[in-house]
Image: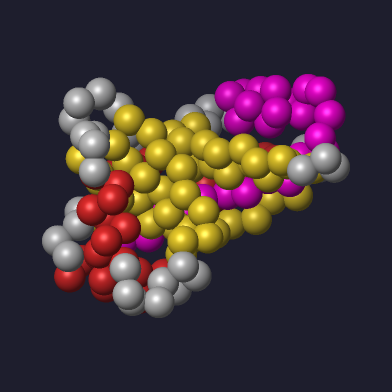
Amino acid sequence: MKVEQISIFLENKSGRLAEVTRILSQAGINIRALSLADTSDFGILRLIVNDTEKAKAVLKENGFTVGKTEVVAIEVPDRPGGLAGILEALEGKDINVEYMYAFVQSSGENAIIIFRFDELEKAIAALQEAGVRILKGEEVYAL
């Protein structure tokens, strides 16, 4: 029920993002989803890739600081209120969403939202109780 995500710390300067994508491309690693957040000094690139361990290794070999985190991938109806329904399932359960990002494969069907929760197991239990479809890592890596 959990998905592995890698986080890469990038200097906030021109070409660093291109360098990461080039390294991953040359290693045959496919990016399935991403999020980029920045400050004035650095950025955090969060990636879901088809081969987490290989991605971590090649990026570290090239001098990048890389961490691995467990997140949850949830299938959400791609319509108004889809996300609201998911968040309602968590309401009142004392679970904090640390961050999230989404992607859609085919508009009008389902979107996939990646969530990082402060209490991962508690969030998974609440979502399952509400009948929310949680994707397995293998499903997300193969999208």
Q: Split into 4 quadrants, where in the image is the N terminus?
A: bottom left
* Position above or below: 63 against 20: below
Please give the name of the residue rendered at 62% of the width and 38% of the height, measured from the top-left corner. 36
Residue 29, position in %: x, y?
52, 32
- Residue 137: image location, x then y, percent: 35, 51
The residue sitting at 35% across, 51% down in the picture is 73
Position of residue 68 in the picture relative to residue 90 (left or right): right
Q: Nearer the viewer, residue 46 or 109?
A: 109
Percent across and percent down for residue 28 are 53, 27
Q: Which residues are magenta?
A: 1-26
Name the residue at 46% across, 43% down.
101
The residue at 24%/37% (across/down) is: 80
As drawn, the residue found furthest toward the left would be 131
Quadrant location of residue 59?
A: top right
How many numbered circles are shown?
0
Snapshot quadrant of residue 126: bottom left
45 vs 106, left or right, is: right
Q: Is residue 33 visible?
A: yes
Q: Is residue 60 above or below residue 96?
A: above
Image quadrant where residue 64 sits: top right
Color style of the picture = secondary structure
Q: Is residue 101 left or right of residue 16?
A: left
